[in-house]
């Protein structure tokens, strides 16, 4: 599953890799929750997560807040 806030690009890339596309803006907590629910219901779990948003923070998910 590919998540992107650019619908045209996300759709094109997902199609090219024979994957599924989910529209979301991951800077919005409601979108993050919706993506997790969608992945969980469609795939059962998140087995690999690649964050390629162009920004980065070091730490575990437990140690990083939404405002970070």
Image (tube, rainbow, N blue to C red):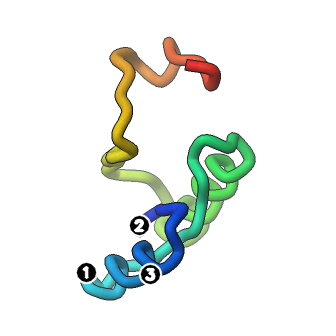
Instruction: Report which residue position mark 2 lands on.
Output: 2
Q: Residue at x 62, y 25 (%)?
A: 66
User: Of residues 6 and 42, which is closer to you in this image?
Assistant: 6
Quarter assignment of residue 58: top left
Question: Eyeballing the image, is 24 above or below 20?
Answer: above
User: Where is the C terminus found, in terms of image quarters?
Assistant: top right
Query: What x and y, as percent, mark residue 55?
Result: 37, 33
What residue lies at 34% left-to-right and 40% top-to-bottom? 54
Q: State the quadrant of the N terminus.
A: bottom left
Do the residues under discs 1 and 3 have CB atoms within 8 angstroms?
no
Q: Earlier in the sequence, mark 1 or mark 2?
A: 2
Q: Tell me where residue 14 appears, x and y as whole percent.
A: 36, 79
Q: Nearer the viewer, residue 39 or 27?
A: 27
Q: Secondary structure at mark 2?
A: strand
Residue sitting nearer the eye, 11 or 19:
11
Q: Earlier in the sequence, mark 2 or mark 3?
A: 2
The residue at which mark 3 appears reads as: 11
Q: Which residue is mark 1?
A: 17
Name the front one of labels 1 and 3.
Answer: 3
Asked if residue 58 lies left or right of residue 32, the reply is: left
Near-viewer residue (60 or 29): 29
Against 65, residue 31 (above or below) is below
Using a 10 Å C-alpha cutoff, classify the residue at mark 2 as few (fewer than 14 neighbours), some (14 to 19) or many (20 or more): some
Tags 1 and 2 touching, CB below 8 Å: yes
């Amino acid at each position: 599953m590919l998540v992107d806030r650019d619908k045209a690009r996300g759709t094109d890339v997902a199609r090219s890799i024979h994957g599924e596309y989910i529209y979301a803006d991951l800077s919005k907590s409601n979108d993050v929750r919706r993506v997790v629910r969608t992945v969980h219901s469609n795939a059962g779990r998140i087995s690999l997560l690649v964050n390629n948003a162009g920004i980065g923070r070091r730490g575990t998910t437990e140690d990083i807040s939404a405002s970070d």
